[in-house]
Amino acid sequence: MKKDTPQHAEIIGFSVIDGCLAVGGMPVTRLAEQVGATPFFAYDRALMSARVAELRAAYPKDVHFHYAIKANPMPAVVQHLARLADGLDVASAGEMQVALDTGIDPLTISFAGPGKTAQEISQAVAAGIVINLESPHEMEVAADAATRLGLRPKVAIRVNPDFELKTSGMKMGGGAKQFGVDAEQVPQMLKRLSALPLDFHGFHIFSGSQNLREESILETQEKTINLALELASHAPRAPKLVNIGGGLGIPYFPGEQRLDLKVLGDGLENLMPRLRQELPGAETVIELGRFLVGEAGVYIARIVDRKESRGQVFLITDGGLHHQLAASGNFGQVIRKNYPVAIANRMGAPASEEANVVGCLCTPLDRLGDKVSLPRAEVGDLVAVFQSGAYGLTASPAAFLGHPPAREILV
């Protein structure tokens, strides 16, 4: 079945009860009553748990998994994943507080991102989390905070490698980048670090994200491990942490296939012996966001009007790009493609028309589904946009045109 006409939610991972999409075993019509209003995002905790279990079963036992909060920072989601993952990665002081609120060991929290302010770095030093340094300037700021607070923070260097994750949806390394320190500059930075009141902890090497090719991911992981071992020879002490990034993608569009975790796990196992031998005390970390939560979320909006314009059907909803920007095609897509869309309370009904699913905003960009084959839908029906568990609400312009924010629920 085409991914843009999924009237069988089992393809996505959800269940159907009496013709209605269910999240966490509850029909979304009932969830809408529980939430109290549409639109809303519903996240299935069981699907998140299953994804982590799949990773544990496929990967080497000594590989640890961290959740990158930026993918979905809803506190309930973070609390749930904090119990399943081995650590949390944050990109702001706000995310850091959400992570600390889970009660996990601060040393399993790491703070990455360019442009950390002196205040944020000071907060991170005080909290006792690992700071991923992205420049020599950040290193000096961290040292100043350490001296002022009388603490010796653990720091890692985020490395911008001289290679990239091929065919990735978003390249975070290779070439000129605002992220991290160019690999060739790291030895000099390590030399300076050894003279500062900082505790060198390891390396963070992240090359790209949203990749659906196993061979590309494994090739990049091999290069990443080799680079980490090379840089370790310049470090003031053997690293305790080697974060080899993530890059694992999820399918959004027709023709895309899920990654084979066994292939990835077996491939990484073949790369691990040298790392284990040369850095026996180092923890190997894979950092994942979208892969853990993306497929576990669905965006639900209600149809408030149905109209025809010059032969085309428009289903107008109370949602839109101000809540789910990525599904509108305005979050990195060059050629717009539909996220999987369904009429949530008519699951299993045959597709009988081609319709455009749009939002309530006064802009032609506000389109959740472009010419999608769907059952005939009426005012009051619910539209489901799948693959909405990552980079949804907090990655969207919620204040645009002043409409109410979407709600969120973890089921």
Image (tube, rainbow, N blue to C red):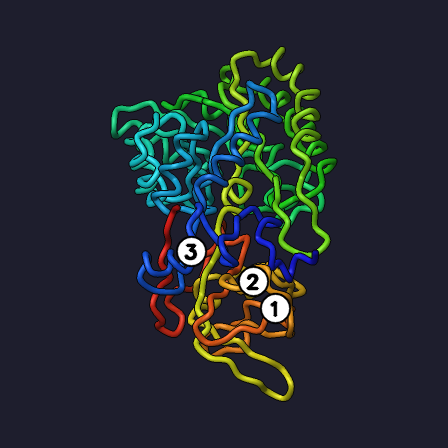
Circle nearer the viewer, 3 or 2: 2
Judge the density around disc 1: few (<14), some (14-19), many (≥20) Cα neighbours within 10 Å: many
Residue carrying label 2: 342
Above/below status of 364 relative to 115: below
Asked if the residues shown at circle 2 and circle 1 are in contact, with their CB atoms under 8 angstroms apart, the answer is: yes
Looking at the picture, tell me which residue is in the foreground, 274 or 381.
381
Label 1: state its secondary structure. strand
Distance, label 3 to label 1, CA atoms, is 21 Å
Q: Amino acid at mark 2?
A: Ala
Q: Is 119 on the left or on the right of 212, as rendered?
A: left
Q: Sequence order check: which comes first, mark 2 or mark 1?
A: 2
For image coordinates 36% across by 37% down, the residue present is 79
Residue carrying label 1: 374
Circle nearer the viewer, 3 or 1: 1
Distance, label 3 to label 2, CA atoms, is 15 Å
Label 2: state its secondary structure. strand
Q: Sequence order check: which comes first, mark 3 or mark 1?
A: 3
Judge the density around disc 2: few (<14), some (14-19), many (≥20) Cα neighbours within 10 Å: many
The quarter of the image holding the N terminus is bottom right
Residue 267 position in % (x across, y down) = 70, 26
Residue carrying label 3: 41
Residue 204 position in % (x across, y down) = 53, 31
